Image (spheres, rainbow, N blue to C red):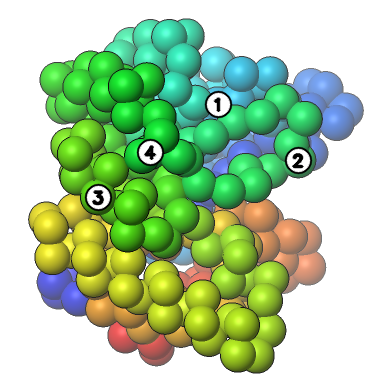
Amino acid sequence: MTAHHLRLGVNIDHVATIRNARGGDHPDPVRAAEQAADAGADGITAHLREDRRHITDGDIDRLSEALTIPLNLEMAATDEMLDIALRHTPHAACIVPEKREERTTEGGLDAAGGHNHLAPFVRELKNANIRVSLFIEPDPAQVEAALRLGAPVVEFHTGRYAHLDGEERATELRRIADAAALAAKNGIEPHAGHGLTYDNVGPIAAIPQIAELNIGHFLMGEAIFTGLETSVKRMRELMDLAR
């Protein structure tokens, strides 16, 4: 693995969404995580939401025991989630905004406006040797806020990029590239994720400072048609091609 290897984190939340639609234990998100690892994923991402709409506490227990690759726990900045993270000590914890009525994460944290609230969470996670990431918009003010908070990693929200076309998409891509360069210049490792597909991942993967992409919904959707191993391997190929 070279210094230019772009890591792929596979989010397995929506395997749990399908399971929870009927109850029971099938399909199993842990099995999906293991298959993704076998197919070339560098890490597994799981978002334990406050309402437990997909991933459950038991899933985090089993993922922590079963995985041989890093687990990235996505979490809201709440005392309950902090306690869970400190109990499991995953490789990484990505702090994300969370609204109960949203279908999926709709944007980045306001790390600038929420400094005082976020600071103790970043501190406690770092003290536990958990790699803290902040899910933010690709905006200089948010990068600077992450630097003030002492977060070693930021993950840029690519949802806006994914839903734009033409010159608007090109403008958003430049914004992401500039934010990644700013983060790296200040010693913060930039990641990216949300809304990435086979068709739009290339330009994001080509940004040299970005070290990791986290992709879930699209890969699970493609897995219905081609199988999870095939969908992960194809994404891995496209990311490598962009580099």
Residue identifier under label 1: 48
Kindly report which numbered mark, 3 or 1, lies closer to the viewer in this rendering: 3
The residue that appears at 67% across and 76% down in the rendered structure is: 164
Name the residue type under label 4: Ala
Q: CA distance from mark 3 to mark 1?
A: 27 Å
Question: Of residues 67 and 135, which is closer to you in this image?
Answer: 135
Residue identifier under label 2: 103
Sequence-first tag of 4 and 3: 4
Question: Of residues 48 and 62, which is closer to you in this image?
Answer: 48
Sequence-first tag of 2 and 3: 2
Locate residue 243 relative to residue 103 in the image: left or right: left
The residue that appears at 88% across and 28% down in the rendered structure is: 22
Q: Position of residue 93 (x, y in %)?
A: 35, 33
Residue identifier under label 3: 144
Question: Of residues 106 and 11, which is closer to you in this image?
Answer: 106
Q: Position of residue 222 (x, y in %)?
A: 71, 66
Residue 162 appearing in the image: yes
Kindly report which numbered mark, 2 or 4, lies closer to the viewer in this rendering: 4
Sequence-first tag of 3 and 1: 1
Q: Is residue 111 above or below residue 193?
A: above
Q: Which part of the image, by quadrant, shows the C terminus?
A: bottom left
Q: CA distance from mark 4 to mark 3?
A: 9 Å
Q: Position of residue 220 (x, y in %)?
A: 67, 56
Q: CA distance from mark 2 to mark 3?
A: 29 Å
Sequence-first tag of 1 and 4: 1
Q: Position of residue 86 (x, y in %)?
A: 30, 14
Which of the numbered marks, if any, corresponds to residue 111?
Answer: 4
Kindly report which numbered mark, 2 or 1, lies closer to the viewer in this rendering: 2
